[in-house]
Amino acid sequence: MIRKPVTSALIAALIIASPIYATMEMEQAEERANRESAQEDLYDAATGSLDEHEWSRAAQQFREVAQMGGNQADAALYWLAYSQHKMAQRSDALATIVDLQRRFPKSRWAEDAKALEVEIRQSAGQRVAPESVSDEELKLIAVSGLMHTDPERAIPILEKIISGNHPPKLKEKAIFVLSQSGSPRAMEMLARLARDSSRPDLQARAIRNLGILGGDRSRIVLKEIYVSSNDVKIRKSILKSYMISGDRVQLLVLAKGEQNPELRGEAIQQLGILGAKNELSELYGAEAAVALRKKIIHAMFLGGNSEKLAELARGEKVLELRLAAIRSLGLMGGANTTAGLISLYESDPSLEVKKAVIHALFLQSNGKALVSLARKEKNAAMKKEIVSKLALVGGDETADFLMEIINQ
């Protein structure tokens, strides 16, 4: 929802009327941080959809990230164009590339976008003059087409690119192309790269693409590397690959039994991105540590499990966890969460819970719900809490209500 700014005169009147508005800048900073966090979570979910070849879902998610603006908008536009290309929506993909070049001419994704444009035009049968394309981009395009013509002939060429003195971007593309082949030779090469800790960047890329490749052989290799490696970064890469391959079983095992808290938290997050609602509910019931239960709540938010979050918001015995569930419901938005939050506010006597609900509705920019609560609220302190948020939400209905207060 686009917020309409409250007039400066109205803000001034409200500041004079109550000292609580001294916290407005802090609230705004917190809101920005929350929105940046939500954007990062959505971008992670979109890359997961991309790795699963869910092109339509990835396109929608990357479109939403791009519309949010922020630091990842240019990357989101590139991957939106890539997803559109994969769905054979060539005109849409080219239009998205133009949008990227117009909005972010100095973006680090600009060169990738040019290479993608060439690939799109060639796939549409358009002749692209070699002199108009840089050498690196031509190599990327050539590598992309190798597997479609002669896979067995392509693999040695790809191996030469990966082991030779070529730009990292070209090597990463070659590894991705390998992951698209189902041949035993390609699998053997990927596994060798995934085990090679002397080249950590290529190792991490190979691990990721083993997840894309999927299958029992990939899972065996990933498990072997996870058990033998002491590198937390590499282990995190493997956890992400489990998510990409949809391996809920292994992620749940590690979320329950991994001794490193950081890795346990990562396994929990990947279950959330995967949308593993049942597994997370099971994990929550078995976990005793509050810190990890909070991570599970965040993972439930990533997985869109509003039903379980609403249940925890109503019945969780640990207040800190109840408040975390309420906050997650606020970040999720939607009519169902709004109705549940209002019901919770009206039925729960706890002031901490009421404040958490007010903040959750504020995160939704839900001025209508906040005005409704403010009109009914008899407690002066709680009414001030609501009004302090309304001054930041904006909108005609909110402004009208605030004017009512000033004119009283």
Image (tube, grey):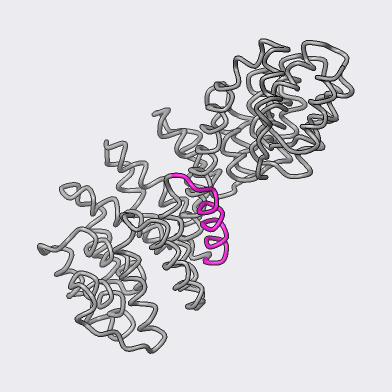
* 385 or 50, nearer to the observer: 385
Left or right relative to 195: residue 299: right
Q: Which span of residues is magenta-colored? A: 55-70
Q: Residue at x 71, y 18 (%)?
A: 14
The residue furthest front is 9
Compare residues 192 and 273 and report the one nearer the observer: 273
In which quadrant of the rendered view does residue 202 lie? bottom left
Q: Quadrant of the C terminus?
A: top right
* Left or right side of 195 for 124: right
Residue farthest to the left, as pictured = 165
Q: Is residue 134 above or below residue 273?
A: below
Which residue shows up at 23% across the image and 50% down it? 201
Among the 4 quarters of the image, the one containing residue 228? top left
The quadrant where residue 344 appears: top right
Can you give x and y, in whole percent of width and height, for residue 393 in the image? 69, 33
Quadrant of image for the N terminus: top right
Location of residue 254 in the rendering, given as x and y in whole percent from the top left corner? 46, 38
Residue 156, image x and y in percent? 18, 75
In the depicted view, which residue is nearer to us: 259 or 176?
A: 176
- Residue at the (11%, 64%) spot, across then down: 164
From this view, report whether residue 136 is shown above or below residue 381. Answer: below
Q: Is residue 56 magenta?
A: yes
| Residue 116, percent from left and from top | 35, 71
As for residue 69 lying within the magenta part, the answer is: yes
Label total for image:
0
Q: Residue 348 vs residue 307: left or right?
A: right
Q: What predominant SS class does the magenta segment belong to?
A: helix
Seen in the picture, residue 383 relative to 172 is either above or below; the reply is above
In the image shown, does 283 or 270 lie closer to the viewer?
Answer: 270
